[in-house]
Amino acid sequence: MARVIERNLRRFNEIVRGRIRKDLKRYVNHGEMLGRKGRETVSIPVPNIDIPHFQHGSKGSGGTGQGEGEVGQPIGSGQDEGDGTGIAGTEPGRHIREVEVSLDELAEILGDELELPNILPKGQDSIQSKKDKYNTISRTGPDSLRHFKRTYKQALKRQISSGTYNPDRPIIIPDREDERYRSWTSVPMPQANAAIIYIMDVSGSMTDEQKELVRIESFWIDTWLRSQYEGVQRRYVVHDAVAHEVDEDTFYRVRESGGTRISSAYEKAVSIISREFPAEEWNIYIFQFSDGDNWGEDSQESTQYLVENLLQVCNLFCYGQVRSPYGSGEFIKDLRKLEADFENLVLSEIDSKEGIYDSIKTFLGKGR
């Protein structure tokens, strides 16, 4: 019986994951998989998998049916689907079941469906560091690491087992075989070797709809990069005419207002990198989201600062421009002039939620 249950469960999981793969683009674009449970899983609504069966009506409610009939027409009571008003009905409805998938599984599905190449970390960051911990006991070692309690305990055990221990005159003299020493093991310590800096324009032209696009896309970017590195550090920058480093919750909830100076965000990103993530030790990713509206004189300063300070140190600099009814959308045109000279600069235009899926593939498809 246990084997049958295990086989059925495995088959059910395969069906569920097949459904997730089939509908992945819809899930990505509309954020239906964003209900995290703890740190390791997300809740995914999937339609029930119904086994065909007969359902009997109430006693005396009907007789034998004759005629052609229509596909989907109920048999028995003859009740049709209602509009939700009136007395309670007896017909079953369609329900949604939630299944849980780990973030690692989700990243694997995402990578397969988008055909994302695995990332090759640069430099020494792909190597785990090791730390020695004194957590074992050895029979050899220097006198400075002699474990006196263990040594005398071993000597006591030896004397008791050999019959030489005298409880009236408890003299315990360890010999060489009794000596025990503190020792160590080398424990691999995964390095937090990837730093992601998210930059979002929160000026007056960015609406809640645009920020929702950023939230959904950032979730999937996080999911993929977490699968490629042992550890990921994230920092968040918001800006209007002035940039601020904020926590994750503030990043997604801050209200929009003010003008726009993109260069202020770039300056803040450089400050964070200089303070916490030296380029020779970290794989640095920057994802910027804006509606492309910028104070006219600042655009040239921004692109120059980007070239001189950020593109030199980033594995990947991704700029996603969301469509806004108020933004000019001009900034991406300035960045397109740089594309040919910098392979680590990737640009994407996100007109609506339907564009998130393709934007993620554009950003992560180079495997940098």
Image (cartoon, rainbow, N blue to C red):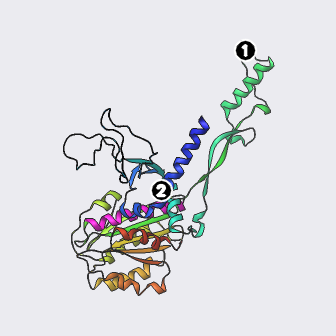
- Which amino acid does the dot numbered 1 rest on? Arg
**Residue 8: image location, x then y, percent:** 55, 43
Q: Which residue is mark 1?
A: 169
In front of the other: 337 or 296: 337
Say above or below: 189 vs 312: above
Q: Which residue is mark 2?
A: 19
The verdict on residue 222 being magenta is: yes
Say above or below: 125 vs 339: above
**Residue 52: image location, x then y, percent:** 45, 45
Q: State the residue at coordinates (40%, 80%).
A: 306
Q: Secondary structure at mark 2?
A: helix
- Which amino acid does the dot numbered 2 rest on? Arg
In front of the other: 232 or 76: 76
Range of the magenta residues?
208-230
Looking at the rendered structure, which numbered label has been put on residue 274? none
Q: State the residue at coordinates (47%, 71%).
A: 361
Residue 304 horizontal side relative to residue 206, left or right: right
